[in-house]
Image: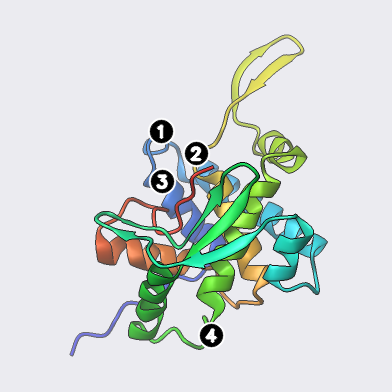
Amino acid sequence: MTARPPVETDEVVLGARLLAALPTHEARPEPLLRRWSGIAAETGAGLARRYAGRTVDEIAASLALPVTEQPGGVTTGQLTLARYGGRPPAVRVFTDAVARADAEVERRGWRAWFPAGCVRDAALAHEAVHHLLHGADGAALKHRLDHVLLRVGPIVLRGHVLGADELVAHAFARRACGLPVSPLLITAALSAELDLAPLAPVGSEH
């Protein structure tokens, strides 16, 4: 029997790999992607410290984000665990997609890393971060990533780093849920298993 290769669990490495698979990042050097991934992880960890001691539902309540649960989230080519959006903003958690992701955790023998119930909580925490990044926290993230598109004298135009907000959300979810490894691991597994686009399993519309 062929032994399984070791599972990569380093948050920054996983994040850099997912960035590398996204459009616009294919030709970027690995050290840059790792730097961006590290900044995103640090940002997510910092946001989580802001809400230390609260459950993810308490975090959502503190942000005035209504949370509903409904069937669905499973379509051809996409698995959406939760979705942030609407006016006023709210989060919908899709129970069928959560069950599919949880089954993948069980199938791979990762239950010690991802206890029962944590997939739903991580999905909710993930979407709460998208809410936070619409404000000052998003502007601070862009400044820290320092993706300079144009510099003319004192004028600096910084661009959006595709996928960075997703990495921040994963890092936040990991810490808000007290997980030993990042939910990025589930995202990577589902992307490979279902032939999805990278980051698609926890896609958001926001």
Which residue appears farthest toward the left when viewing the image? Answer: 1
Q: Nearer the viewer, mark 1 or mark 2?
A: 2
Q: CA distance from mark 2 to mark 4?
A: 30 Å
Q: Residues within 10 Å of mark 1 (few under 14, many from 20)?
A: few
**Amino acid type at mark 4:** Pro
Please tell me the numbered disc located at residue 162: 2
Considering only vertical position in the picture, is 28 above or below 183? above
Instruction: Give the residue displayed 37% in from the left and 47% down from the top.
Output: 21
Please tell me the numbered disc located at residue 115: 4
Do callouts 1 and 2 mark residues in contact (Cβ within 8 Å)?
yes
Please tell me the numbered disc located at residue 24: 1
Q: CA distance from mark 3 to mark 2?
A: 10 Å
Task: Find residue 58 and report its horizontal and vertical position in percent.
Answer: 75, 69
**Amino acid type at mark 3:** Ala
Q: Quadrant of the rendered structure where residue 182 is?
A: bottom right
Task: Please say whether residue 72 is visible from this viewpoint.
Answer: yes
Task: Please say whether residue 6 is visible from this viewpoint.
Answer: no
Q: For the residue labelled by badge 1, is the local secondary structure a helix, a strand or a loop?
A: loop
